[in-house]
Amino acid sequence: MDLKNLFEDTLKASRKLALLKPATVDAVLKAVAAAAIEQTEYLLAENQKDLDRMDPQDPKYDRLKLTEARIRDIAGDMENVAGLTSPLGEELLHKELPNGLDVTKIRVPLGVVGVIYEARPNVTFDVFSLCLKTGNASVLKGGSDAAFSNQAIISVIHDVLKKHNIDPNVAALLPPDREATEALLNAVGYVDVLIPRGSQGLINYVRQNAKVPVIETGAGIVHTYFDESADLEKGKAIVNNAKTRRVSVCNALDCLLLHEARLTDLPALAAPLAEAGVEIFADAPAYEALKGNYPEDLLKPALEEHFGTEFLALRMAIKTVRNLEEALEHIATYSSKHSEAIVSENPEHIETFLNAVDAAAVYANASTAFTDGAQFGLGAEIGISTQKLHARGPMGLEELTSYKWVVRGSGQVRQ
């Protein structure tokens, strides 16, 4: 494959997107959603080829796996995106200057969005839908682990685009090899922004080697602090949901911070985790509180390496703290600035936590599992940005736009 030609074709196709009517875009998204459902058997068969090459114990296996239910959810997300109002053309500022110039600041597409991701075929659908809705072309670089799945998905998308007389180059899939990665990192003049989705290693590599501007979607090293005043029943549900709902996602809980005054409640707090088979790495006070009250084969003493680890598995660390300040210090030391939560009935502690914690999403008395574009009402997401420039948190439609200044005059010249 001639990658330079591919980039050129995608750039040319991106310019045509500005001419598409919103109704056409929505119709395409709905048609792709319907096609995904219709082609479920084909998509699952191709996905199985990828699954057959991966160890089921690999944390990425669950991310790679497609099911009928997941395909329905993906289709539902695309339907949701189709139903959202496009931000394109939104007037952000409008004023008339003393010299008579009419100045407007409006939302416009970023242009060509490149995304590098690992074993997550759903990302192919998500990126396409969000980019098309915002007038962006997309260059997709999936990992080799999901090669069959991604090729099947892009073929479904291209078929729909052709039926609607839209250049299929608006959604390009690169080969799953290192050469393609290097080409994308260096696609200056063709790709406007590059978004890596995956492990911290992938994100670091892209940030350190890309010549194209990068928006980081970081790994999730997630904490929940169970305060001295926390409600036990709320805590049980929140901690269990944050840890076990889906262990392979970036908003899953990695470390429970427990106020020392609540050590006696730890066995009850951890009971749902035991039922789910969660392996716990507990510091000395937590270990003693759980010893004899938690399955012996699932309870291990915590080592320093267990703090600041994104487990992506049925594993979790527990750290005992003396007060809120110590919890905040631990989070500041180990957090990846993704999602952090407090369980507390103390309003002052809640506000201190929400204001002091530096993360893309902070929660009070709720599970971090909600850090998700669809859950935040964005329809879907292209990733969770953990940086502070341009976008932060779930990146939905608005985050895939820039703006430009439109100036209308009547012959004015500057003196």
Image (spheres, rainbow, N blue to C red):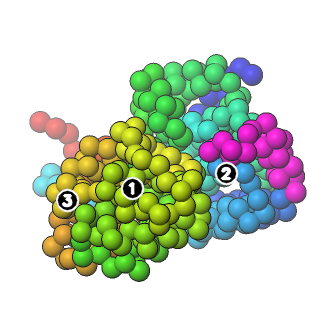
CB atoms of marks 1 and 3 within 8 Å: no
Is residue 316 among what the camera can see? yes
| Mark whose residue sits in front, 1 or 3 | 1
Task: Find out whether residue 48 is within the magenta segment.
Answer: yes
Q: Residues within 10 Å of mark 1 (few under 14, many from 20)?
A: many
| Mark whose residue sits in front, 2 or 1 | 1
Callout 1: SS = helix
User: Which amino acid, mark 1?
Assistant: Tyr
Residue ID for mark 3 = 322
Q: Position of residue 12 (x, y in %)?
A: 61, 34
User: Which amino acid, mark 3?
Assistant: Arg
Q: Quadrant of residue 362?
A: bottom left
Residue pictured at 12% horizontal, 55% vertical? 98
| Mark whose residue sits in front, 2 or 3 | 3
Closer to us: 384 or 284: 284
Residue ID for mark 1 = 287
Q: Which residues are magenta?
A: 41-61
Q: Position of residue 304 (x, y in %)?
A: 35, 39
Split into 4 quadrants, where in the image is the C terminus?
top left
Closer to us: 323 or 80: 323
Please indicate whether residue 329 sits to the left or right of residue 161 in the image: left
User: Which amino acid, mark 2?
Assistant: Asp
Residue ID for mark 2 = 62
Please indicate whether residue 308 sits to the left or right of residue 77 in the image: left
Callout 2: SS = helix
Closer to us: 294 or 21: 294
Is residue 396 among what the camera can see? no
